[in-house]
Image: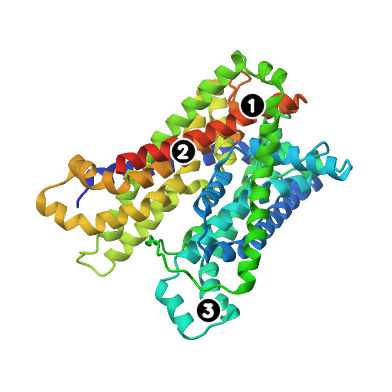
């Protein structure tokens, strides 16, 4: 095969991920075996937090999708100035640090926020309303972006046939747009539900008390405050039982990946859609930008700015940068060799027996499933397992940095593999035979053939991994020692100590850092591609 060595590296990486996950689960099982009690499953507090976890995740998912479908239908069928910028902003909303989102939402909709000041009221959003607002703020733009992409992939000839047949607005939606939207609904439903169910920072900051606690936050409280590892193991196991079947179904039901060229064909739209487009665009833009504008307003508070810029900020910034750079680099290297393994397994059809292709496909599915196991083994579960394992062996806080990097790599891995997979499979399929005839193999193939074609996708994956790890707070809060402070954790500490101006200023610093890094990393790789 063309890149056998890379595929072997991919096999080693997948094996290491499997061993890392298995070790965490074994540690959880060994710790929880003695503490397990069937009567604990009927504990009213456990039943309450399980029910609330399901309730908030389901409501967040349904509201996000119900808002995303009509907006995507309007945006996906029209070409207008600023469309690409709006869609890029939608992508950024999904990867922004959640603690920044929390502060932005509180600044607008909180008790002292802009909305309450305008309405002259003191309505509090802490609890379920605040959690739903933050989740919808993140997931509604993400779902809209995915559905717009699905509508844009409808072949042009189908639009032309519909136009020739005189389809009205209803028939165009039913026969063309709904089929494209429907193909992405179940994956979106499962992914957003899992993200909301495993949400940590938002629930921790917006929960407002035991009545609005989820399993993820309860694990953190059991380990860090109550020191009840047995109860934490029970919670982690319960979370695993709920999320694993959903993640496996999500992984099994993956729509086919496509990469189509954009067309200048102007799709037919009704007069109602034209009239609705501008108000909807204004409403969506206000919804997305208003929390950021409320945070940026805090920059004019010079006293808070002076207090924020201290030695602790420099230390937190250095640690966050080390985590983000290491995570981004490792994620890209591992995603490339895993895709090489997946391609080798998927394309090796020249077999002597009838069953060998089936085994190959099954092997590719297993390898991809292990690589993306963070979808059904939540990060908090892995962190809990390794926390207990290292706690028994030595000082767990010595390994905080490495654990945070590894788990962040695993969190970014499913997205990175998915982003690189489409162009990688296309370039490998098209040039495999020609490269082998010309003797362009090994590192020469990666540099001459793969790099020019993949650099854009690599840049997108690197930027996503960088920003995701830069804003992660849950893993650091769970396994970090009091001296291990990152930028998101510093924001939370300001917020927990009721130092809102300092928290808002630092959130703006984090927000601007994410925007600049995301833009520069993508531009750097695109320039290499040019």
- In this view, the residue in front, 223 or 337, is 337
State the residue at coordinates (64%, 36%).
100
Circle 3 residue: 175
Residue 360 or 132: which is nearer the viewer? 132
Residue 204 vertical position relative to residue 133 in the rendered view, above or below: above
Report the residue marked by disc 2.
519
Number of callouts in the render? 3
Q: Earlier in the sequence, mark 1 or mark 2?
A: 1
Res. 506 mark: 1
| Residue found at x 51% / y 69% | 180
Q: Position of residue 491 (x, y in %)?
A: 66, 27
- Viewed as shown, does residue 364 lie left or right of 42? left
Displayed quadrant of residue 498 = top right
Residue 89 placement (x, y as % from top left): 55, 47
Residue 205 vs residue 209: left or right? left
Helix, strand or loop at mark 1: helix
| Nearer to us: label 1 or label 2 | 2
Residue at far bottom of view: 165
Q: How far separated are the C-alphas under marks 1 and 3?
A: 49 Å
Identity of the residue furthest to the right in this view: 121
Q: How crowded is mark 3: few (under 14 residues within 10 Å), some or many (20 or more)?
A: few
- The quarter of the picture where the C terminus appears is top left
Residue 323 on image: x %, y %: 48, 28
């Amino acid at each position: 095969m063309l890149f056998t060595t890379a595929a072997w590296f991919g096999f080693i990486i997948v094996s290491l991920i499997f061993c890392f996950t298995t070790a965490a689960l074994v540690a959880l099982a060994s710790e929880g075996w003695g503490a397990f009690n069937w009567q604990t499953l009927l504990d009213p507090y456990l039943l309450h937090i399980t029910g609330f976890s399901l309730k908030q995740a389901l409501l967040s998912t349904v509201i996000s999708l119900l808002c995303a479908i009509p907006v995507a239908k309007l945006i996906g069928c029209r070409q207008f100035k600023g469309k690409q910028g709006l869609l890029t902003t939608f992508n950024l909303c999904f990867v922004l640090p959640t603690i920044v989102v929390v502060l932005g939402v509180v600044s607008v909709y909180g008790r002292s926020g802009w909305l309450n000041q305008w309405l002259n009221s003191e309505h509090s959003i802490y609890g379920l309303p605040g959690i739903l607002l933050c989740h919808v703020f993140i997931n509604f733009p993400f779902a809209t972006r995915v559905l717009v992409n699905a509508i844009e992939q409808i072949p042009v000839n189908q639009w032309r046939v519909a136009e020739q047949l005189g389809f009205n607005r209803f028939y165009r939606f039913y026969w063309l747009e709904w089929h494209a939207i429907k193909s992405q609904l179940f994956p979106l439903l499962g992914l957003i539900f899992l993200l909301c169910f495993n949400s940590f920072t938002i629930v921790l900051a917006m929960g407002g008390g035991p009545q609005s606690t989820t399993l993820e936050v309860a694990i953190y409280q059991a380990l860090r405050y109550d020191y009840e590892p047995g109860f934490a193991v029970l919670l982690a196991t319960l979370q695993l039982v709920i999320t694993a079947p959903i993640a496996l179904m999500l992984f099994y039901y993956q729509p086919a990946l496509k990469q189509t060229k954009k067309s200048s064909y102007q799709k037919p739209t009704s007069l109602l859609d034209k009239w609705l487009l501008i108000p909807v665009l204004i409403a969506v833009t206000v919804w997305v930008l208003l929390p950021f504008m409320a945070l940026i307003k805090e920059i004019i508070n010079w006293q808070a700015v002076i207090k924020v810029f201290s030695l602790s900020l420099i230390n937190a910034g250095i640690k966050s940068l080390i985590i983000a750079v290491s995570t981004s680099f490792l994620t890209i290297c591992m995603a490339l060799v895993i895709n090489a393994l997946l391609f080798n397994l998927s394309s090796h059809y020249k077999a002597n027996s009838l069953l060998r292709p089936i085994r190959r496909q099954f092997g590719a599915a297993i390898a991809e499933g292990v690589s993306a196991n963070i979808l059904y083994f939540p990060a908090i579960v892995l962190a809990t397992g390794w926390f207990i394992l290292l706690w028994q062996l030595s000082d767990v806080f010595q390994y905080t940095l490495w654990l945070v990097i590894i788990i962040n790599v695993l969190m970014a891995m499913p997205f990175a593999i998915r982003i690189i997979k489409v162009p990688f499979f296309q370039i490998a399929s098209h040039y495999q035979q020609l490269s082998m005839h010309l003797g362009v193999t090994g590192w020469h193939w990666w540099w001459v053939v793969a790099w020019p074609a993949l650099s854009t996708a690599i840049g997108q994956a690197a930027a996503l991994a960088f920003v995701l790890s830069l804003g992660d707070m849950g893993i650091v809060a769970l396994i970090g020692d009091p001296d291990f402070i990152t930028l998101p954790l510093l924001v939370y500490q300001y917020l927990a100590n009721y130092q809102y101006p300092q928290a808002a200023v630092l959130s703006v610093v984090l927000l601007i850092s994410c925007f600049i890094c995301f833009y520069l990393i993508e531009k750097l790789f695109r320039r290499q591609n040019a």
